[in-house]
Image: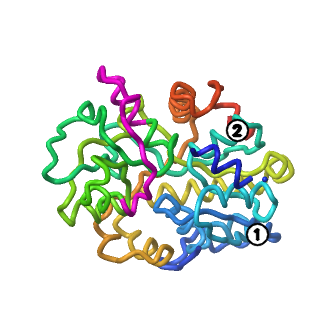
Amino acid sequence: MVWQLILRALVVAASILAASSAATAQPSSVTTIRFIAAASDDLLPFWYAQSTGLFRAAGLNVVTSSAPSGAIVAQAIVGGADDIGRASLSSLIAAHIRGVPFVLFAPSAIHRKQSSVNSAILVAANSPLKSVLDLQGKVVSCTAIGDIGYLGLRSMIDAQGGDSSTVRWVEIPISAVAAAIDQGRVDAGVSSEPFMSRDLTAGKVRSLADMLDGYPGEILEGAYFSMHDFAAANPDAITRFVRALRQAALYVNAHSSEMVPLLVANTGMDPDVAARMHLAVIGVTFDPSQIQPVVDAAAKYKIIPQRFDARDMFWTAVR
């Protein structure tokens, strides 16, 4: 389960664009921040800010490292090897409820109900399954029991009058979902970019529904965070980091077609796949109402022991 991965874990820049005029002014002093994350398209604003000099213009020397998973990111932050990380919301919720003093201060990807198209439940192209209610009693894959897609699909099935407890879940990496469906090992699987577009283009699978539409309204899929003590000791640096990210997110959201080279440079992704995928929409404001539905779903489905106020996860400066 997600929280088990976190508990076990706890015991990237490329230049493609000319620096903006805002990035030309260099401050007299520079603060070094060590940043870690697993490569994902929702890091595009970070990569853009790094490659165009927005962080440097904000007086920050951001040193980056990559991790294979959110669990490793969490371990690096807790252990002090890095200062700021980006991880999935479900991982951060699991850590918070168990007393890990992470604080969140900037959003990454957000999902807008019935408008974002970077996640889906995939089924075989010739599958008789027509709606999420048909998944009752079926074998469905997810990245991890308790992740944001798992919770969203369960919520969607129950909201439509079904019984999501009858779904039989298995954990399979998103990259392997289409193969598992094709081989008959699962009836359906939670998927997201970049693999969703790759697999849909291949033609052996189709989209049944967007599992994240099971949440009421916008939800946050991931966030930037640090240990509470680091944020308390470095409020000005974090404020400058957040401002640079927001400036970059505004640009990235408005110029998604320009981002393919940056994505390829930082992920090693096939350029054709990168050009076809639906890039994540990046949040430019930080609102606890985008987090609370995921907290509530995690409590409802016993991924965490009880509900809590999402505002408790926020660094006080951004409440």
Q: Nearer the viewer, mark 1 or mark 2?
A: 2
Callout 2: SS = helix
Which residue is drawn at the image coordinates 16% and 47% (left, top)?
Answer: 127
Q: Position of residue 166 (x, y in %)?
A: 36, 30
Earlier residue among tags 1 and 2: 1
Q: Amino acid at mark 2?
A: His
Which residue is drawn at the image coordinates 16% and 54% (left, top)?
Answer: 125
Which picture quadrant has residue 22? bottom right
User: Would you call the spot at circle 2 few (<14 residues within 10 Å), some (14-19), or many (20 or more)?
Assistant: some
Is 154 contained in the magenta span?
Answer: yes
Q: Position of residue 24 (x, y in %)?
A: 63, 74
- Pick the front one: 25 or 254: 254
Callout 1: SS = loop
> How far apart in space, not on screen, are marks 1 and 2 (Cα)?
35 Å
In the image, residue 77 above or below residue 211: below
Which residue is drawn at the image coordinates 74% and 61% (left, top)?
Answer: 76
Is 168 contained in the magenta span?
Answer: yes
- Label 1 sits on residue: 27
In the image, residue 260 above or below residue 147: below
- Label 2 sits on residue: 96
Which quarter of the image is occupied by the N terminus? top right
Q: Magenta span covers which residues?
A: 152-176
Q: Give left or right: position of 233 versus 113.
A: right
Q: Amino acid at mark 1?
A: Pro
| Mark 1 vs 2: CB contact within 8 A | no
Which residue is drawn at the image coordinates 24% and 49% (left, top)?
Answer: 123
Q: Position of residue 240 (x, y in %)?
A: 70, 56
Which quarter of the image is occupied by the C terminus? top right
